[in-house]
Amino acid sequence: MGDPVRVLVVDDSSFMRKALSGLLSSDPEIQVVGTAPDGRFVLRKLEQLQPDVVTLDIEMPGMDGITTLSKIMCDHPVPVLMVSSLTQEGAAVTLNALSLGAVDFVPKPSGQISLDIENARAEIIAKVKAAAKADLKNLAKGRIRVAAQAPEIAAAAAERPAAQARPVGPVARIVAIGVSTGGPQTLMGILPQLPANLAAPVMIVQHMPEGFTRTFAERLDQACMLAVKEAEDGDALGNGRAYLAPGGSHMTVTRGRTIRISKEPYDTLHKPSVDVMMESVINVFGASAIGVLLTGMGKDGAESMVKLRRRGGHTIAESAQTAIVYGMPREAVELGGAEFVLPADRVAEQLVALVD
């Protein structure tokens, strides 16, 4: 075992600082090297303690989490994991934080601090370890790419065709995308490059908790030429449309070309699960499916990419050149499940070519 992950915990609540510190310290591979009550103390402690990861509360008096994050990324870049309330407003602010350079986030109960955080122990520990492995250079390059293409994409999205102008032919092909840590920024760079007349629907599993996926889907919809929505049970698949799995539930496709949202299976590490989604896509579409595995920790989706490739479908894995966390796509590559290994800025072009 190598050196433990050094963590600085920042939260205005002394109870939460103690709870998070105790929770993280219970893992022998993590060391809490310090705490801070608000953003004013953070930069000094970063210089002094040299943490590998900062957990940062979004809602703090004085210097709030967003301001603190901006200063961290400007003056002393280090992987930051946001701690966010489970509210619509909290979801919007959290997505802003991800666009400013936070690697990922973990939810905490809104209002009075609750011991429910102990129930999220495994997720918080896993995300801290994933954040420690994040490539901040790729994170920064991705932010620059997204910012550079934003004006052109916004103009194109504003002129996207109405629903009746979208391709209405039979759904013969499908694109299935799986992504985790670093995903919001990566998807924001890829999906807006896909044309409104894409002759396939796009199903997306982003590891994200309930309460955040609807807000994220709305942001993608505003930025994309494709119509993007949080998937609902019974949605009919349509070409030129993208469906984001709701947090806390699995998304699969039926033989009737409709979407099914369910809590089953219950025993998966992630909910939504990339493997669960891709398995259903393989069963229904077989060789007519295209699988994509992007940045993220772990191996969710890797084995399904192997199965899809063996069935004759096309598969794309993001390369280490751009992946913020080269975990899930690396697993697919090492297992032989990646037909194409590409940087994120070439994925959309390859998808269009494969769909055509």
Image: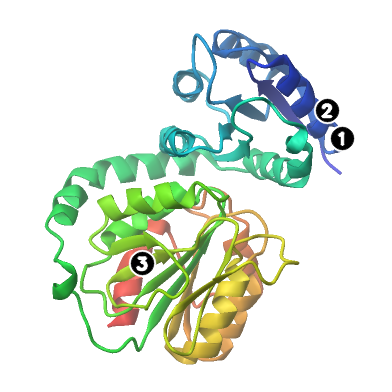
What residue would you read off at disc 1?
Answer: 26
Task: Give the quarter of the figure containing the C terminus.
Answer: bottom left
Residue type at mark 3: give it.
Answer: Ala
Q: Provide the secondary structure element on which disc 2 rests.
A: helix
Task: Give the quarter of the figure containing the N terminus.
Answer: top right
For the residues bearing labels 1 and 2, Cβ distance under 8 angstroms? yes
Q: In the drawing, what numbered circle is on residue 244? A: none
Q: CA distance from mark 1 to mark 2?
A: 6 Å
What residue lies at 14% left-to-right and 66% top-to-bottom? 161
What residue would you read off at disc 3?
Answer: 242
What residue would you read off at disc 2?
Answer: 22
Left or right of residue 32, residue 207 in this image: left
Where is residue 110 shown, x and y percent of the image?
A: 59, 31
| Callout count | 3
Q: Is 141 rendered above or below residue 163?
A: above
What residue lies at 48% left-to-right and 36% top-to-bottom? 94
Where is residue 67 shown, x and y percent of the image?
A: 44, 19
Crowd tier of the residue under label 2, counting other residues whose Cα lies within 10 Å: few below 14, some 14–19, many 20 or above: few
- Kindly report which numbered mark, 3 or 1, lies closer to the viewer in this rendering: 3
Q: Quadrant of residue 175?
A: bottom left
Q: Provide the secondary structure element on which disc 1 rests.
A: loop
Left or right of residue 47, residue 23 in this image: right
Where is residue 93 shown, x and y percent of the image?
A: 44, 32
Mark with earlier residue (2, 3): 2
What residue lies at 43% left-to-right and 65% top-to-bottom? 231
Q: CA distance from mark 3 to mark 1?
A: 40 Å
Residue type at mark 1: give it.
Answer: Ser
